[in-house]
C-alpha cells in the first residue's frame, strides 16, 4: 500500500510534462477556427472604430511617430506638450492600428528576450505593453471602454470554448467539436464575461471603505483624529487590495480554465485562481515559465513554417512571372508582392503599384497574406488558453489532490443539450 502511494507521488511530480502537449492541442484545426473567427471579429471591430482617426501621428523621416511613442519615451519629460505638437501636425490614425502595432512589437521583443534569457528584456516588453494600455485608457477612454467590452465578450466566448476543448482533451483525451465547445461557452458566457470584473469589484468595494474615513477627515477639528483612529482599518484595506491585485495578475490566466474544468461561476473561478496561486506560488511560476519557453519555441516553429510557405510560393510565382510593367524592366510581381522576410511577412513600403490593376492585385495579395498572419496569431491565442488549462489542472491536482481526469459534466443539470463528458 505504501509502495503504491510512493509510485503515485513520483508520477505526480512528472505531471508537468503534460504542458508539452499544449502544442498538439493548440494546433488543432477546431481551436484555430474558433480563434481565427474571434480574431477576425476583433480586427473588424477595430477597423470600423478606427474611422474616428483620433490618434495624432507624424511622419518623421519615413518613420511614423504616434502619441503612444511619445507616451512611452522615457527621454521626453513634457509629454503633454509633445502630444499637443503631434496633434497640430494635422495627421491622424486609429487607436486600434497603433495598439496592434505596439502589441506586436512588444510580443516579438519578449520572445527574443526569452531566447536570449534576458529577464530584464521580458519585463521591459511587458511593462511597455501595459504602458500602451495605460495610454489608450488615459487619452481615449470612451473608445477603449467600448472596444475592450467588445473584445472581452468575443474572447469570453472563444476562450471558454478553447479551454473547454483543452480540458476534455487533457482529462479524457476527448476531442469535442466546435458546436459542443461553443454551446458550453454560450451557456457559461455570463460567468466567463464577469470573471475579469470580479477583482475590480472587490477592489472598488474595499476602496469605498478606505474612502469613507478620508471623507470624514474633512470634518473641522476632529477630522485628523478620525483619520488617525481609522489607520488600522485603512491599512488593512490597503493590504487586502494589494493581495487582490497580485492574485488577479498572477491568477488571471486561470479564470477561464477554472470555468471550463469545474463549471465554476465568475466568483468561484477567481476564488480558485487566488487559492492556487497563493498556495503554490513557486509551482505556478515554474509551470508558467515552462509554458512560456516552450510556447516561444512553438511560436518560432509556426512562424518559420508560415515564412517558408510564403517564400516558396512567391519564389515559384516569381520564376514564372516575367512580364514587365509600364515603367521599364520591373517584374510585375515585385510591384504588387514584396519579398517576405521572417520579421515582415508583407512590407507595404517595399511596393509601388501604379496602375489600378496593380493596386487591386496588391490589395488581394495583402488580404491573403493577412490570413496567414492571422493563423499565426490564432495559434498564439490557442496555445495561451490550452497551456493555461493544463496548468490549472496541475495546480488543482497539487493543491486539492483532484485527479486531472476529473472534469465538469452536465449530467446533474436540467439542460440536456450537452453530452456528459465525465463522471
Image (cartoon, rainbow, N blue to C red):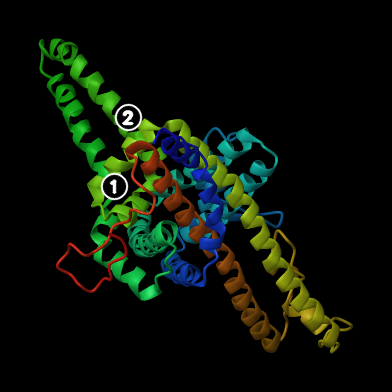
For residue 249, side relative to residue 259 (left or right): right
Question: For residue 339, which quarter of the picture?
Answer: bottom right
Tell me where residue 78 appears, x and y as whole percent: 52, 35
Foreground of the two, 274 or 149: 274
Residue 90 appears in view: no
Question: For residue 417, which quarter of the picture?
Answer: bottom left
Tell me where residue 43 appears, x and y as whole percent: 47, 67
Label 1: element kind: helix
Seen in the picture, residue 268 relative to 48 is either above or below; the reply is above
For residue 304, side relative to residue 170 (left or right): right
Would you call the spot at circle 1 few (<14 residues within 10 Å), some (14-19), or many (20 or more)? many
**Residue 243 image label:** 2
Write the residue at 45% across / 46% down. Answer: 391
Foreground of the two, 356 or 167: 167
Would you call the spot at circle 2 few (<14 residues within 10 Å), some (14-19), or many (20 or more)? some
Give the quarter of the figure containing the N terminus: top left
Write the residue at 58% across / 55% down. Answer: 104
Tell me where residue 392 appears, x and y as whole percent: 40, 47
Residue 38 appears in view: yes
Seen in the picture, residue 328 relative to 54 is either above or below; the reply is below
Name the residue tied to disc 1: 269
The mark nearer the N terminus, 1 or 2, is 2
**Residue furthest to the right:** 329
For residue 334, side relative to residue 58 (left or right): right
Question: For residue 214, which quarter of the picture?
Answer: top left
Write the residue at 36% across / 31% down. Answer: 279
Seen in the picture, residue 35 relative to 236 is either above or below; the reply is below
Amino acid at each position: 500500500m505504501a509502495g503504491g502511494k510512493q509510485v503515485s507521488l513520483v508520477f505526480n511530480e512528472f505531471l508537468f510534462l503534460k504542458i508539452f502537449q499544449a502544442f498538439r492541442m493548440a494546433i488543432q484545426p477546431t481551436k484555430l477556427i474558433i480563434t481565427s473567427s474571434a480574431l477576425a471579429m476583433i480586427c473588424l471591430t477595430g477597423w470600423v472604430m478606427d474611422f474616428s482617426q483620433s490618434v495624432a501621428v507624424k511622419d518623421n523621416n519615413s518613420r511614423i511617430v504616434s502619441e503612444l511613442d511619445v507616451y512611452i519615451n522615457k527621454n521626453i519629460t513634457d509629454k503633454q506638450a509633445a502630444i499637443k505638437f503631434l496633434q497640430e501636425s494635422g495627421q491622424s490614425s486609429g487607436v486600434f492600428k497603433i495598439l496592434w502595432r505596439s502589441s506586436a512589437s512588444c510580443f516579438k521583443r519578449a520572445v527574443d528576450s526569452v531566447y536570449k534569457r534576458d529577464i530584464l528584456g521580458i519585463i521591459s516588453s511587458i511593462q511597455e505593453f501595459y504602458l500602451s494600455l495605460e495610454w489608450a485608457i488615459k487619452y481615449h477612454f470612451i473608445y477603449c471602454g467600448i472596444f475592450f467590452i467588445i473584445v472581452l465578450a468575443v474572447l469570453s466566448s472563444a476562450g471558454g470554448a478553447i479551454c473547454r476543448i483543452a480540458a476534455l482533451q487533457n482529462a479524457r483525451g476527448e476531442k469535442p467539436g466546435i458546436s459542443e465547445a461553443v454551446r458550453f461557452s454560450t451557456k457559461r458566457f455570463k460567468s466567463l464575461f464577469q470573471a475579469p470584473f470580479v477583482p475590480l469589484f472587490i477592489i472598488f468595494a474595499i476602496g469605498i471603505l478606505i474612502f469613507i474615513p478620508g471623507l470624514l477627515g474633512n470634518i473641522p477639528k476632529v477630522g485628523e483624529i478620525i483619520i488617525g483612529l481609522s489607520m488600522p482599518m485603512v491599512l488593512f484595506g490597503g493590504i487586502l487590495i494589494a493581495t487582490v491585485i497580485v492574485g488577479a495578475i498572477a491568477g488571471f490566466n486561470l479564470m477561464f480554465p477554472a470555468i471550463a474544468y469545474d463549471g465554476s461561476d465568475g466568483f468561484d473561478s477567481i476564488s480558485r485562481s487566488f487559492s492556487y496561486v497563493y498556495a503554490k506560488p513557486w509551482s505556478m511560476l515554474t509551470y508558467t515559465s515552462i509554458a512560456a519557453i516552450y510556447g516561444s519555441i512553438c511560436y518560432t516553429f509556426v512562424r518559420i513554417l508560415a515564412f517558408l510557405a510564403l517564400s516558396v510560393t512567391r519564389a515559384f510565382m516569381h520564376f514564372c512571372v516575367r512580364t514587365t510593367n509600364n515603367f521599364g524592366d520591373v517584374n510585375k510581381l515585385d510591384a504588387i508582392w514584396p519579398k517576405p522576410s521572417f520579421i515582415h511577412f508583407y512590407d507595404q513600403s517595399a511596393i509601388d503599384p501604379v496602375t489600378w490593376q496593380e493596386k487591386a492585385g496588391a490589395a488581394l495579395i495583402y488580404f491573403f497574406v493577412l490570413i496567414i498572419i492571422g493563423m499565426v496569431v490564432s495559434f498564439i491565442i490557442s496555445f495561451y488558453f490550452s497551456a493555461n488549462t493544463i496548468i490549472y489542472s496541475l495546480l488543482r491536482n497539487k493543491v486539492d489532490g483532484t485527479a486531472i481526469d476529473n472534469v465538469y459534466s452536465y449530467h446533474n443539470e436540467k439542460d440536456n443539450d450537452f453530452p456528459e463528458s465525465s463522471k
